[in-house]
Amino acid sequence: MQDARKSAAKRLEAMGLPQRRDEYWKYTRPDLLTAEKPAAAAIFKHGEGPMFAAIDRLKIVFVDGVYDADLSDDLTLQGVKIWQLCDAPDWAQESYGKLEETGQSPVPRPLATLNTAHATEGVVIHATGESCKPISLIYQRKSETSDVMMHHIIKLDEGVSLTVLENGAAAARLNTVVEIDVADRAAFHHIRTMGRDHGRVAATHMFARLGAESTFKSFTMTMNGKLTRNEVVMELTGDNATAHVAGVAMGDGEFVHDDTVFITHDAVNCESRQVYKKVLRNGATGVFQGKILVQPDAQKTDGYQMSQSLLLDDNSQYYGKPELEIYADDVLCSHGSTTGAIDDEAMFYLRSRGVEVNEAQDLLILAFLAAAVDEIESEEIADHIRDRLASWLTRRRK
Amino acid sequence: MADGNEMIAKEGVEEDTVEAVKGLAGDYKYGWETDIEMEYAPKGLNTDIVRLISEKHNEPEWMTNWRLEAFARWEKLEEPDWSMLKYEKPDFQDSYYYARPKSMQVKPKSLDEVDPKLLETYTKLGIPLKEQMVLAGVEGADAAPADAKESRVAVDAVFDSVSLGTTFKEELSKVGVIFCSIGEAIRDHPELVKKYLGTVVSPSDNFYATLNTAVFSAGSFVYIPPGVRCPMELSTYFRMNAENTGQFERTLIIADKGSYVSYLEGCTAPQRDEFQMHAAIVEIILEEDAEVKYSTVQNWYPGDENGKGGIYNFVTKRADCRGARSKMMWTQVETGSALTWKYPSCILRGDDSQGEFYSIAITNNYQQADTGTKMIHLGKNTKSRIVSKGISAGKSQNTYRGLVSMHPRATNSRNYTQCDSLLIGDKSGAHTVPYIEVKNNSSRVEHEATTSKVDDEQMFYCQQRGMDEEAAVALIVNGFAKEVLQALPMEFAMEAQALVAISLEGSVG
């Protein structure tokens, strides 16, 4: 693993940190992520119960980016082997940084390489059989100025399924890399809620490889935060694989949320879906950079990309760059992107039926977000997410 | 693949389609050259050449200085590489920047005095340079002389670096319309040129525009006075003939308050093994309530089936809708060129102004196209519509690149974008690179893009209503290109339809 870190440091030196003029950072300023030290971010007390509390799960807790054995459950679970990154078994040491490195082409992602070079905390999860419950990674914060890097390695053996939950702010500045290798016919589910501290900044990266007939489903909810850059880099390498990535972002005021997704189809008859919805107000900014790359032999590809934003006032902004790059002819790829205010007619409909204005607005916003939330397989978790979204809106009524 | 010309068609794609696509790029009809004595500026590019070009056009000093400033700027610029085009960067010193037929040394007083060899070139291309002639290829034109008036087109014929002449000048001047070459305009209407030239595409706009500003020759100038509806279509026909020579024309169209003009542009070049550079600028200014339609059928030599030769087409086209309620419409049918780098754009500055962009881009063999538009919404209640259809065959790459930008002041504005790509054969590529920037919430921006063969849902809809599969496909496919074809003026629709004559029947998998 030391070798991988060294080679990452070398790679980083060659590519340099992200710059404002980089096309890949066209709409989001990387300054806060590359500054020498993170700005202090107050710890936000939202007064709501912890995420996923009602769900039976195995808890792994990091406090300010450091594994906390006392707060965590015992790391034994049927069908799954779990290690701390520092105790990584040989295979994980071997694969450390591998998917991250492959994901550097065609666009360099220096912050991920920075992570590979320096991260010491994280977990290694190896799903070998059917696990009885989800694994929940909880990122707690105590320090107002913590600068945290975590690097997780997740491997699913053939035919098994695994659910990973992530929540919490983790740090004033967070940089995570998760490398996920999904073997043939395996199914990976991922639900994440980003920390709600208003001043925090985060750059997260998921690098995934999908085998034949495998499934990958990831959903992210972001509320608050000064700057969030969530990157997904995925390669569908086996035939008939399915990859869905979705997200909702709720921004009020000083808020920049950037979803940067790059999906490569390198096998036949695969399906990929990107569904991203953003609700922005009081000067919040939403960014979506999505790309579907269909390699020459990836016939029968079904690629779909949807990015929508609701701008609740004139100060909020949305930037989108939904790209398709297609080298195979028997494909069905599409993308859609819409931006605008809440539909007056829908509003009128509800108001004319006696629904109070705030309530009507919330209803329409939740309806707008539904398509993304529906991507969550577990109804229990989806309901939990819907409740959080509704209460966020209620709290922000004028 | 042993035979580069062989195109692998997908099962279900009809032979006709394959033939039609092949015909578009494979067998270039305009590849012959006119054997004529030419006069060149020395090879290469430096301040002397820039001065020489200015001198050849008898330009006033302000124009020479303008060129020299642009050239100084250009020398500091680097050729951009952000597009999806992959090519060896040309050596700008290994080309001629000015070429004119010897017989044009003394400017002929009228077209009658022009060297018949040159006129023959245009006859062969089907471009009428005699006023009594109607545009060749317009069906029924000969049979119905009564309607002939309707299909008259004034032509500015450009041959390498010179304008041969402009037809219908007198008749147009009766209503106040100025239609001449840009060189004549610089001499005869300096006040208009000074007021407008370079105000839409500034000399520092981009690498190719700056180059053009330094070395441009020929191109057309159009001024439509307030309230005038131009009585006929105006057109420019660009012909590149000389070897190793770049063509750098510059067109300036000014539509004053409440005026209307429809402008057509056509272009061809001989078949050669060497790449040739074409870097043009088109600037259009629309004042209040003005309306301009600009239609292009771009058919530069695309190179042979092995990707040898062809035109490198780097064009900057932009319209500035300065006045309220002005309306700009770009329509392009892009079938030629080895490389196409072209983004006809609209700056929607005036309140309630409108911009439209309709495009069909067809690439075959080793052609590469990176084309699209920019719609910059600055004024209130502005509207834009983008319809782009890309068809890629052979080993070609076809990219739509576009920007829709809603500025904070552009409240209640609207954009609708649709980009559809169709792939024929599995060696080609179709790409979409749209940029969307929205900075106010009363505007609506919608973007849709698809890459496929024929939409299943549309098929289902038609079949559910009792149409058989063939009829359904015919209907949908008609729709694929028709949206754009219909936007073309009648004079061009024929040519374009012949070019696009693609039956996609049976292409549903």
Image (cartoon, rainbow, N blue to C red):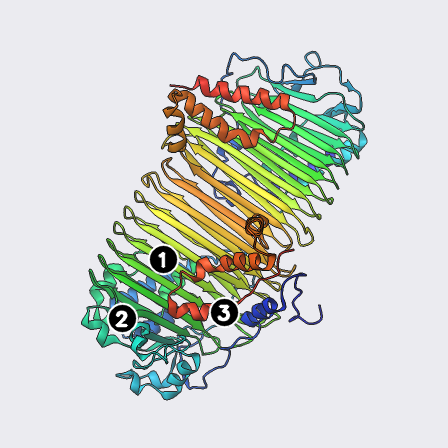
Residue type, label 2: Phe
Q: Is residue B175 visible?
A: yes
Q: How many marks?
A: 3
Please identify the quarter of the rendering in which residue B202 is found: bottom left
How far apart in space, not on screen, are marks 2 and 1 (Cα)? Answer: 20 Å
**What's the chain of the residue with tag 2?**
B
| Residue beneath the point at 39% across and 64% down | B295
Labelled disc at residue B499: 3
Residue at image point 36% right, 67% down: B264
User: What's under tag 3, amino acid-wise?
Assistant: Leu
Q: Please check whether the numbered discs 3 and 2 fall on a single chain.
A: yes
Sequence-wise, which precedes: disc 3 or disc 2? Answer: 2
Q: Which mark is residue B179?
A: 2
Q: Secondary structure at mark 3?
A: helix
Residue A210, position as x, y percentages in the image:
71, 39
B112 shown above or below B72: below
For marks 3 and 1, the one nearer the N-term is 1
Is there one chain holding both mark 2 and mark 1?
Answer: yes
Q: Name the subunit of mark 1.
A: B
Image spot of residue B11 (x, y percent): 68, 61
Same chain check for tags 3 and 1: yes
* Crowd rating for badge 3 (residues with CA inside 10 Å; few <14, some 14–19, many 20+): many
**Foreground label between 2 and 1:** 1
Where does label 1 land, which residue? B329
- Is B216 placed left or right of A144 in the picture? left
Direction from residue A354 to residue B450 in the image, left or right: right
Alpha carbons under labels 3 and 2: distance apart: 28 Å
Question: Dot 2 surroundings within 10 Å: few (below 14), some, or many (20 or more)?
Answer: many
Label pair 2/1, CB-CB below 8 angstroms: no
